[in-house]
Each structure stands twice: as C-alpha cells, then as structure tokens.
C-alpha cells in the first residue's frame, strides 16, 4: 500500500495513464465526475511539483558538492583565469579563497562592503582588491583610519571645510568623500567612530550628499564605501555604542579575514616574500633562516598576524649576519616562548622525554648545525658537499628534506 503512495515520476506517469484511460471511455461527465477528475489532476500536479522541487534540491546539492571538491589550488587558478586581481595575497587557504570569491562577486557592484577581522590580517589590502576589480579602478582609492583622527577633527577630515570655518582653517579644504568621488572610500577601524560622527556619516551615506564645515550648500558625491573593523560591531550595537542603522547600511556584503594562525599554509610564501622585500629595502642579500628558526616561525601563533610576521622578518634581516636564528627574534617573543636557552639547542623537549628521545634530539640538532655550516661554506652546492663527505647525494638530499633545510636559500646571487 505504501508503494502506491510513493511520490515518483513513474508513479505519476502511471496515474496519468489511468486518468487518460478512464476519460477515454466516458462520453459525458456529470458534475461529481468533473470534480473527481479535478481532484485527481490537482493531486497529480502537487506530486509533480514535489518531485520537481526534490530534483532541483538534488542538483543544487551536487553542484555545491562539486564546488567544495574543487582543489584549493584550482580555485585560486580559476580566480586568476577570470582576471580577478588580488596581488599580494598568497596561498591556497580555503577560508581566504572563500573571502576572495565573495569579493569577486561584490567588486563589480556599488554595494557597501565591510571587512572584519583581527588587526594585521590585511583588511586594507582586501579593500584595495575590491577597488581594483571594480568599475572605479581608474578613480581614486582614499583611505581613512577612523581611530587615528581626533574625534573633533573627523568631520572636517571626511567632509572638508571652508576658509575661516574654525580656528586654523586658513583655506578651503576638500574632505575624503570629495577626494574619493567616483572612486572608493575605505574607512578603516570604523568601530572607533563616536556616536555623533556615526550620525553624520550615516546621513552622508543615505542621501549621497555632504556639507563642508562652514558651508550651507550641499555637494553630491558618488563614492563607493568599504569599511573595516577589528571590533565586534554586533556586540557594540547591543551595548549602544554603535548605531544599528549605520551597521546595516555598511554591511550589505560582509567578509571575515581569517587570522594567520589559521593560514599556516601561507607562511613559507609570506616568509620568502618578506625576505625579498626587506632585502630590497636594506640593499643586501636575502637573509638565510636556520632550520631551528624556520620551525619556530611555522609554529608561532602570531597574535599580530601578517603585520607581526613582516616586522619579525625585517628585524632579523637587519640584525642577523648571513643566517638568522632564534636569538635574533624580538626580546618579547623570546621571553614569552616556552624554550629555555639550553632547550633551544635541542628544540622543545617534553618533561617526560626519555633518554633515547634526548639522544635523538641531540643528533638532529648536530645534523642541522653541520649541514647548515657546510651549505654556508659551499654556497648551497649539495653536489660538492656530497663529494667532500664521500656521501651518496640522494641520502644527503633526504637529510636536508628531513630537517626542512633548503639548499637554494644558501646560494649567493650573482650580480
């Protein structure tokens, strides 16, 4: 009995055929007969709509499954193939790729975008990505740090002023809204705005007009707004420190940048990038990084995110001679690390480590020091080291791979 009530395409076809056959041998239909046929047709229609809905759901689920199954590297390549510009953003982290895919869809519109995330995660860089991929790319990109401007001066900074409007106003001055006309205005740290300035910003966004301080006439502006914050604006709304109407005005498109500790796959690329960048700034060869320091950099949590990593690489590039090691790290990092000076020689050792584990750690450390010394002497020539040690080159390569030592980092560039 249950099989007769099952909604399937085959069952619907069977019911259609029964209805057709029944009608074929009837010359006339009375009112009750017509109503019976209508009930059967409506029931059949309902089942077909249900089947169609299920089919659409299955197709959508399959589509989403296929999208999720796309390798991250391919997702990145597809963004590039679609001419989406995101220079300076590295790696194939799925969370970051999701952010980029969202911004790709939003960039071509004029919808407001808010970029949330911890300090140092590259929110301004993502704002520039939105601008670079929009129809406004040839117009100005103007950035304002709302937390760095005194509250009393922010109105003048955003909307401008006329000569004599207040003490120190010695000439007319355009505000950031006018400077970004037909372009993009990036309001960083928007959570730092006072309630009074939030009201003034909201009015400008609602009507698309601004007034310079000291001037009655309004100025029409066509400015795309992108904002960023490291604060929880929803909590601030509940506490009454951020206006609800402003939040919903600026957050039509919202993305959250993942912190660097959730993007560890990017670390090797970022370290290499900042090594090259700092070397260019300091006019020297890129600093080499010892295996011990390399392991530390990969395991460190980076509370300051990408900005902190950049500062660390610039510091060691400046202070280290040829190869940087853990003592070249900033003092506050060394003080807060779990490694004592003696333990640094062997790496982090568990309290319950056995003698065999200690021996292995000592051997590993000795191998690392020896290999790095030889690579420095030969400028990264693995073949020469193998010849000097009378060692099979493939075995030497295995040792280097085991300790994550890259011989190319010891090569000295010519010219």
Image: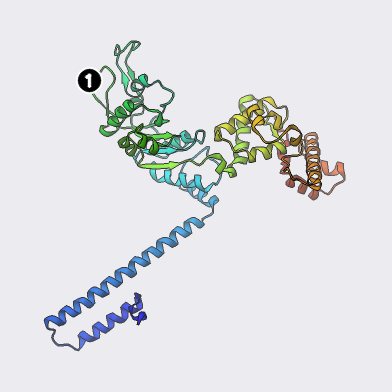
Circle 1 sits on which residue? Answer: 216
Work out which quarter of the rendered image holds the C terminus and state it: top right
> Does residue 55 appear anywhere in the picture?
yes
Is 313 displayed left or right of 3 in the figure?
A: right
Label 1 crowding class (10 Å Cα cut-off): few <14, some 14-19, many 20+? few
Residue 379 percent location from the top left of the image: 77, 35
Is 389 displayed left or right of 262 in the figure?
A: right
- Considering every residue shown, the one lying at the far bottom of the view is 25
The number of discs equals: 1
Compared with residue 137, is residue 394 higher up or lower down, i.e. above or below? below
Image point (44%, 38%), residue name: 116
Image point (41%, 36%), residue name: 131
Image point (19%, 89%), residue name: 25
Q: Name the quadrant containing residue 330.
A: top right
Compared with residue 4, is residue 142 higher up or lower down, i.e. above or below? above
Work out which quarter of the rendered image holds the N terminus and state it: bottom left
Residue 410 percent location from the top left of the image: 73, 36
287 vs 227, nearest the viewer? 227
């Amino acid at each position: 009995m249950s099989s007769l009530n099952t909604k399937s395409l085959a069952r619907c076809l069977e019911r259609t055929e029964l209805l057709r056959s029944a009608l074929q041998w009837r010359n006339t239909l009375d009112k009750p007969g017509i109503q019976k046929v209508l009930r059967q047709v409506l029931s059949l229609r309902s089942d077909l709509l249900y089947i169609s809905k299920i089919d659409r759901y299955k197709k959508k689920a399959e589509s989403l499954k296929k999208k999720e199954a796309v390798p991250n590297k391919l997702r990145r390549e597809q963004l590039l193939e679609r001419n989406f510009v995101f220079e300076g953003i590295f790696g194939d982290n799925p969370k970051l790729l999701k952010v980029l895919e969202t911004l790709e869809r939003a960039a071509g519109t004029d919808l407001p975008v808010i970029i949330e995330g911890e300090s140092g995660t590259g929110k301004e860089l993502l704002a520039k990505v939105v601008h670079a991929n929009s129809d406004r790319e040839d117009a100005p990109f103007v950035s304002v740090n709302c937390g760095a401007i005194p509250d009393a001066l922010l109105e003048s900074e955003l909307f401008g002023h006329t000569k004599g409007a207040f003490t120190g106003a010695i000439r007319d001055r355009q505000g950031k809204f006018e400077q970004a006309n037909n372009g993009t205005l990036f309001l960083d740290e928007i959570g730092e705005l006072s309630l009074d300035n939030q009201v003034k910003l909201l009015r400008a966004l609602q009507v698309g007009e601004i007034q310079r301080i000291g001037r009655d006439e309004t100025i029409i502006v066509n400015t795309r707004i992108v904002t960023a914050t490291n604060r929880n604006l929803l909590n601030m709304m509940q506490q009454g420190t951020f206006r609800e109407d402003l939040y919903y005005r600026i957050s039509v498109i919202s993305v959250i940048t993942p912190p660097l500790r959730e993007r560890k796959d990017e670390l090797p690329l970022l370290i290499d990038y900042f090594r090259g960048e700092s070397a260019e700034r300091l006019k020297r060869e890129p600093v080499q990084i010892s295996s011990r320091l390399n392991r530390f950099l990969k395991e460190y949590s980076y509370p300051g995110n990408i900005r902190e990593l950049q500062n660390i690489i610039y510091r060691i590039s400046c202070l280290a001679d040829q190869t940087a090691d853990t003592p070249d790290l900033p003092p506050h990092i060394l003080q807060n690390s779990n490694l004592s000076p003696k333990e640094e020689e062997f790496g982090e050792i568990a309290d319950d480590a056995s003698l065999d584990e200690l021996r292995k750690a000592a051997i590993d450390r000795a191998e690392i020091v020896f290999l790095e010394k030889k690579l420095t002497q030969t400028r990264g020539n693995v073949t020469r080291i193998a010849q000097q040690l009378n060692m099979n080159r493939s075995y030497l390569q295995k040792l280097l791979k085991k300790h994550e030592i890259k011989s190319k980092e010891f090569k000295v560039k010519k010219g």
